[in-house]
């Protein structure tokens, strides 16, 4: 209830920030000029705003996008307001495991450090569809592609953290929609079946997978003694291209819930806060909303399912290598 109250009023929570805070406000005064960040889906929506604000704080930003025209446009827009911004573009199609591997190879060949990885790209409410790897579209794009990407970049992040003494951070864009998934949480035994498919639940399932993945990775990194944190965030409700498959539904929803909607600068605030803010030093395996810690659903906190999803995902990315 406190969450809903502060969402409507915009009053800050314990962190000092709330739903009305923008990405610029929550990173005020932070110097990120020694940091390199990758943002998936950084060509539009929340990702593009995240790229702009991280670059404004001095970070070297790599926008990973499948649509290079849109990425170029995003880059030019950022440069217009901030000619000193350091932005590179690199092609990445998350629903193709082959493209994810090619991206990781290209990035590693650039010989840059990697301090921050923001797994932001996502699709929502697509009609039933399998990817070229034979995997359900939401699960493939929102979870599996990022799972492989994160694993391929992990050594780079570990070596950067070690060499620089700066804590690495992985931020996963999840969603409150993780509450609305299939009865069994993750449909391990019928992930790709059309029978019983629901576009809403498939999205919820993939967003649940994001939290479970962050939680299990966080555990593994702590076990390894790596100085890298992993957290997931719900950005809020923001009108973006994400709604392309559900415009009418969203318009109707907005009539009843307009008090809950945020603009894009507010939508990028939790991501930027988790990526840069010093008060989150050492905080890992957590879920945040409006720049404050929140408990995710019961199944999202289930360590056994998190481990099961990890093993399941590992098998899937190897099988289709
Ligand atoms: N907006 C909200 O209310 C809301 C709420 C909860 C969670 N989120 C999460 O926030 C994240 C960002 O969403 P947004 O609202 O900013 O939506 P958006 O404007 O549609 O941004 C998503 C980005 O992901 C990219 N993308 C999609 N599929 C991709 C693929 N296969 N490979 C590479 N990039 C791909 C899109 O590129 P294309 O243009 O090429 O498709 C787009 O740039 C998502 O993970 C979403 O689930 C958003
Ligand atoms: C960036 O790195 C340089 C060289 O290591 C260091 O002198 C400087 O203090 C760092 N800046 C910040 C903001 O950490
Ligand atoms: C979330 O983080 C994990 C790392 O734990 C990563 O492998 C996974 O694919 C990420 N998913 C997204 C998009 O949040
Ligand atoms: C991790 O990095 C932070 C600086 O960002 C540093 O203060 C901390 O001591 C490091 N922790 C470990 C375990 O190396």
Image (cartoon, grey):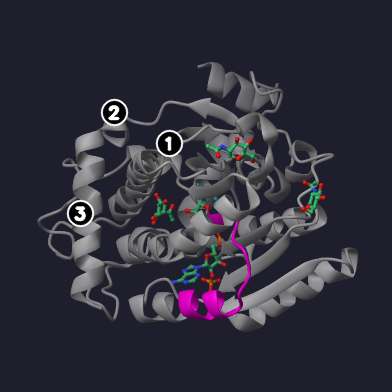
Q: CA distance from mark 2 to mark 3?
A: 20 Å
Q: Is residue 113 magenta?
A: yes
Residue found at the very far front of the displayed protein: 163
Residue 73 quadrant: bottom right
Label 3 – label 1 distance at C-alpha = 18 Å
- Can residue 123 be spotted in the picture? no
Q: Which residues are magenta?
A: 103-120
Q: Quadrant of the C terminus?
A: bottom left
Q: CA distance from mark 1 to mark 2?
A: 14 Å
Residue 298: mark in rendering? 2
**How many other residues sit within 10 Å of disc 1, few (<14), some (14-19) or many (≥20)?**
many
Q: Which residue was labeled with disc 3?
A: 311
Give how far across and how far down residue 221 sits, in percent. 40, 44
Residue at 65%, 41% in the rendered image: 262
User: The residue tagged with tag 1: helix, strand or loop?
Assistant: loop
Q: Earlier in the sequence, mark 1 or mark 2?
A: 1
Look at the numbered disc 2 and give the secondary structure of its residue. Answer: loop
Q: Of 213 and 223, which appears nearest the observer? A: 223
User: Percent x, y for residue 43?
Assistant: 63, 69
In front of the other: 164 or 305: 164
> Helix, strand, or loop for circle 3?
helix
Query: Residue 81, can we see it?
Result: yes
**Residue that label 1 marks:** 285
């Amino acid at each position: 209830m406190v969450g809903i109250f502060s969402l409507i009023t915009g009053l800050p929570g314990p962190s000092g920030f709330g739903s009305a805070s923008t990405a610029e406000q929550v990173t005020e005064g932070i110097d990120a000029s020694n940091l390199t960040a990758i943002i998936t889906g950084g060509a539009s929506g929340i990702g593009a705003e995240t790229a702009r604000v991280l670059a404004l704080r001095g970070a070297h930003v790599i926008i990973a996008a499948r649509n290079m025209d849109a990425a170029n446009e995003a880059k030019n827009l950022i440069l217009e307001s901030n000619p000193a911004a350091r932005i590179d573009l690199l092609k990445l199609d998350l629903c193709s495991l082959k493209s994810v591997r090619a991206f990781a190879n290209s990035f590693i060949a650039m010989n840059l450090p990697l301090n921050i990885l923001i797994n932001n790209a996502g699709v929502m409410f697509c009609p039933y569809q399998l990817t070229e790897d034979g995997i359900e579209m939401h699960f493939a794009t929102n979870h599996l592609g990022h799972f492989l990407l994160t694993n391929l970049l992990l050594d780079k992040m570990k070596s950067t953290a070690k060499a620089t003494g700066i804590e690495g951070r992985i931020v996963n864009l999840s969603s409150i929609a993780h509450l609305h998934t299939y009865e069994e949480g993750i449909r391990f035994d019928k992930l790709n079946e059309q029978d019983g498919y629901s576009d809403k639940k498939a999205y919820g399932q993939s967003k649940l997978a994001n939290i479970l993945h962050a939680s299990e990775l966080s555990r593994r990194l702590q076990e390894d003694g790596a100085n890298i944190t992993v957290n997931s965030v719900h950005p809020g409700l923001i009108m973006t291209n994400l709604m392309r498959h559900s415009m009418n539904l969203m318009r109707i929803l907005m009539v009843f819930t307009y008090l809950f909607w945020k603009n894009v600068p507010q939508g990028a605030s939790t991501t930027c806060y988790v990526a840069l803010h010093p008060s989150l030093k050492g905080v890992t395996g957590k879920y945040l909303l409006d720049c404050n810690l929140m408990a995710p659903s019961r199944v999202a906190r289930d360590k056994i399912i998190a481990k099961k999803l990890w093993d399941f995902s590992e098998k899937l990315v190897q099988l289709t290598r």
